[in-house]
Amino acid sequence: MKVISKFFRRHLVQYLISFHSIFLVQKSWRINNLSIFPAMISPEVVNFDPPRFLNQEYTVKRDQILNKVPSEEFGNHFHGITAVLPGEIPEIAEIQDFFLDSIFYRVEKFPVHKLFEPDFLSAFLKKGSLDARTLGTWSDVDQSIIFESGKLHLSVGKDVYQELGLSGHTEITSSRKQTATYRVTIDVRDEKFIPDCKYYKRVFWCLKNQVCLQFDWIMSWQPHDVDICPSSFAAYLDLLGFGVAQCKPMFEERILTQTHIPMLHPETDLLDVIEWVGAAALNITCPKEEDYASSMICPEPSYKSEKVHILKWRGFFPSSQAKQLLGVILRLHPEVTETTQPAWLNLTFHGFDEFRTAPNIWSVFTTTSDACHVFTSQTSRRKIK
């Protein structure tokens, strides 16, 4: 009996491709050969409905893909990045060291109104690019605060929204049973958002009087002036008495040899190739023929590659860094195959699951042609209008 069916496998790899579930799966299962036996599976777990995914596939011209980052469609923050690069890559050292000097900070018990204090506003928000988000959620409602692209987004429950006193709108949910949340957006780039303006004073007063809006954050700041050191941001917060910890992205690399690679054939389902990418990233073997333990195989048509570089980063990555790395991958040339079908290079970004309309995963395949193949997968509970 085949242990992993096609239906179960598709939902399994959609889970595995997200960094959130990698640690749990590696601790629970023997990933290398997926030797899961029926007696080990709890009936109650098997009967759970699989999570809903909103998948999209489309092609974008190579010279237009960078214009989509950042965007509401692709999101602005990522917690994981995976690169799957078949063939010999002369520029591999540049990619390996891409985030070598990247840093972000964990800031403890930072009140949200501190972002808008006059000194912080003039020194960091007006003279640099800040990306920040609260860690986790609070209360019985999925609530979060994000600062990106010069805007503060508060996603809060009904009680906090009513006490806050700022205008916003209800976020559309896909379930009547789910508690409604409200979205409040504050644009720091607005000309009216200056300390002497009534609008600024009201926003600052409303946020300061909400004592519950104090959290642990992850933050990244890049100054507009290259002569200013980014670490001055952490030094300022430390001077104010906040606990600040410097963090660096985690990097992992693995090289596969003599591996069969699926091709982007017109008749090939792109989701099958995505499954293969997710399996390769998790060191799951996909042979050309099925075996007893798993029905996962390499999609056809395929070719044999001498070497495949798999690079994975985990951390906090603003869209500006994602755009730069994607630009590097776009300059690379995929290896030449013996067939008429082109080889590909893949870059997958894993977004934070905050139940927004931006996808949690978006994956880009580049080939020798002018078109990039894009796959997005969203586990959001929000409806897309």
Image: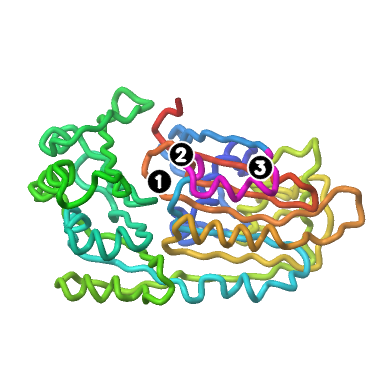
Residue range (magenta): 59-74
Numbered-mark total: 3
Residue kind at label 2, given as amino acid type: Thr
Q: In which quarter of the image is residue 30?
A: bottom right
Q: Residue, x 14% and y 48% (percent of image)?
A: 204
Q: Residue at x 31, y 58 (%)?
A: 126
Q: In the rendered image, is residue 269 in sight?
A: yes
For the residues marked 2 and 1, what is the alpha-carbon distance in whole angstroms?
Answer: 7 Å
Left or right for 56, reference 223? right
Whether the residues at callouts 2 and 1 have beta carbons within 8 Å, the answer is: yes
Would residue 212 appear left or right of 85 to someone viewing this image? left
**Residue 124 drawn at (x, y percent):** 29, 63
Residue 383 place in picture, x, y as percent: 42, 28
Q: In this view, does 58 lie to the left or right of 189?
A: right
Q: The residue tagged with tag 3: helix, strand or loop?
A: loop
Residue 76, disc = none
State the mark number for residue 379. Answer: 2
Q: Which of 235 and 141 is in front in this view?
A: 235
Mark 1 = which residue? 353
Q: Is mark 1 on a helix, strand or loop?
A: loop
Taking 94 as reference, is 25 above or below it? above
Can residue 32 be seen?
no
213 and 126: which one is in front?
126
Q: Quadrant of the N terminus?
A: top right
Vertical side of 102 occupied by 47: above or below:
above
Q: Tell me which residue sits at (28%, 54%) in the image.
A: 134
Quadrant of res 59: top right
Q: In which quarter of the image is the C terminus?
A: top left
CA–CA distance in space, label 1 to label 3 = 32 Å
Lower position in the chain sequence, tag 2 or tag 1: 1
Membership of 11 in magenta stretch = no
Residue beneath disc 3: 2
